[in-house]
Image (cartoon, grey):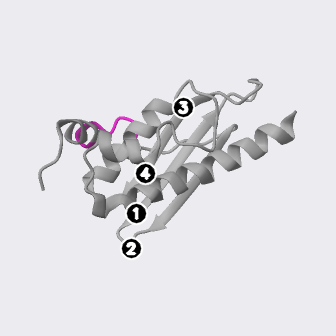
Amino acid sequence: MNYSELTRRYFDGAAAAGVLSGPGTFRGAAGTRAQGTWVQFDLQVDSGSRAGTIQAARFLAFACPHVIAAAAWVAETAVGAQASAALPESVRLLRERFAVPVEKLGRLLIIEDAWIAAAKACLGSVRTER
């Protein structure tokens, strides 16, 4: 398959790959390995922040290079932002940014589902801590 330069760069580097643990860390995952795509996000949030600022984000993925690259970009882009159930960029724009074939759109939706699961865990905690 012919991957875009951006996809190759984020797939090869994947600097945000890994896991986070400890206080203020929230995890969400979606998909299954049996289906060929599984993504997990860990978000570490500043508990002293009123809105829950993301201090660090990591991902793990069992997926094609497009999904790994997009998940790496999402995790990198989220740092410094306020925790939100929305991806830093829409699935449609992620598809365009990484030149993902339309037949892989469902795989990008798994990224969104994993992000939403992590963000909901985080946002629920931020609300209850106030």
Alpha carbon separation for disc pair 3 and 2: 28 Å
> Helix, strand or loop at disc 1?
helix
| The magenta segment | 11-17
Hey, which quadrant is residue 108 in on the image? Answer: bottom left
Q: Residues within 10 Å of mark 3 (few under 14, many from 20)?
A: some
* Of the two numbered discs 1 and 4 in the rendering, the one whose residue sits closer to the viewer: 1
Is residue 23 shown left or right of residue 129? left
The magenta stretch spans residue 4: no
The label shown at residue 35 is: 2
Residue 127 falls in image quadrant: top right
The mark found on residue 106 in the picture is 1
- Please say whether residue 16 is one of the residues in the magenta stretch: yes
Position of the N terminus, as image quadrant, is bottom left
Residue type at mark 2?
A: Gln
| Alpha carbon separation for disc pair 3 and 1 | 26 Å
* Mark 3 / mark 2, whichever is N-terminal: 2
Which disc, if any, is residue 56?
Answer: 3
Which of the two discs, 3 and 2, sits closer to the camera?
2
* Residue farthest to the left, as pictured: 2
Q: Is residue 19 visible?
A: yes
The alpha-carbon separation of the residues under discs 4 and 3 comes to 14 Å
